[in-house]
Amino acid sequence: MGCRQLARLRSCLTHQGARDRPLKTNLFKIIDLFSGVGGLSLGAARAGFDVHAAVELDAKASAAHAVNFPSSVHIRKDISHLSGRELARLAGVGADEIVGVVGGPPCQGFSDIGLRSIHDPRNELLCDFFRLVAEMEPAFFLAENVPGALSERNAPLLNRALATIPNRYTLIKPFVVKASDYGAPTIRTRVFFYGFDPERCNPLTAENFLPQGAADVRVQDALAGLPAIRSTWQKEHQGWRGVGELGKSSFSDRITSRVPAGVGNPDALSRLRRKGEVSGFLGTIHSKKTVRRFKKLGPGESDSISKCVRLDPAGYCPTLRAGTGPEHGSYQAIRPVHPRSPRVISPREGARLQGFPDWFQFDATKWHSFRQIGNSVSPIVAEILLSTIKRSLA
């Protein structure tokens, strides 16, 4: 990172609270269910909400969320065993203090990739999301899932889940979002369910959530200024590396700064501000045969053995997948091949492609960090959607 850029970054981060950050004072408290590492949470915080509590059963994801959101209450519970009253108690608030409930219930059973099982027990968690909405009675709710949730095979469960919503709420038509249309460098596509209490929110329709003038960000834009990765960088301390110029844009602003009050790990923010250092540049050791195959791949081509697809520098990143947890075999997700080097991408490169800022922290391991990135909502998308909702609050 050049001296001029580093000075500018120091000024920006300090101004936005990396040093002596103020305590959160806004009254727009929300709870993030199935929070994961915090893609929705970060978008909400940047939109002006107080992410008061985050509920996440996975220990690694909850711990990573706590690193990035030290001011939030972290609840490691299965929400199917929680009532609205118990959730409010654990969060340390009255139910009437929560203005919004957001979250991304597990999507594996709804996804068009994989088993597509209508009997996947995780599908029921969508019903539990809306049950807690009914019990908490927030001003609004926003749920995220894969487009497959709208398929005919899932209609009975979806209808049962939505029937839980009290009649006083207005549920708008579910809308599908492609992240690249909103200024993120990935084509990740998801469906959102938004509902609101008309006595506390001004009305919105699906058209209000359409992208408006978002920047067109490609893979080469997202990966600009990142160091060449060595396969020998296997330990956490080796993954901290200096980054170079990213250029001036709304994307670079979101990547290098925009730190909400009460959000961010002090050490990560300090290292970025003082030295221009960023974590997550962990290498992957490939066999010589794999390297030779990767070298032959053109943009967008898939490796015949690993099925890894080479990123097109002038294109968008395909949807990054999460792999499976230990309860489902601990399978590593297929990662894209770097557009210029014969290797799969590092966690930090994956984070850039998903729209996470450089100061945002993930688990120290490649497996868990990619699970956290692949399971997350792009914070760029989340910020735009929740900013629209924030402006609607009466």
Image (cartoon, grey):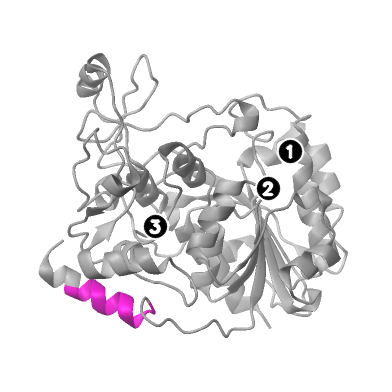
Magenta-drawn stretch contains 16:
yes
**In the drawing, what numbered circle is on residue 122?**
1
Q: Is residue 29 left or right of residue 130?
A: left
Q: Which residues are magenta?
A: 7-17
Question: Which quarter of the figure has residue 76?
Answer: bottom right
Residue furthest to the left: 3
Residue 55 appears at what percent x and percent y? 67, 57
Residue 332 appears at what percent x and percent y? 48, 29
Q: Residue at x 19, y 47 (%)?
A: 227
Eyeballing the image, is 91 above or below 210?
A: below
Nearest the eye: 12 or 56: 56
Residue that label 3 marks: 183
1 or 2: tag closer to the N-terminus:
2
Asked whether the viewer can see residue 253, the reply is no
**In the drawing, what numbered circle is on residue 149?**
none
Q: Amino acid at mark 1?
A: Arg
Residue 372 appears at what percent x and percent y? 51, 46
Q: Residue at x 30, y 49 (%)?
A: 237
Residue that label 2 marks: 105
- Secondary structure under tag 3 reads loop
Magenta-drawn stretch contains 72:
no
**Mark pair 1, 2: CA separation:** 8 Å
**Mark pair 3, 1: CA separation:** 31 Å
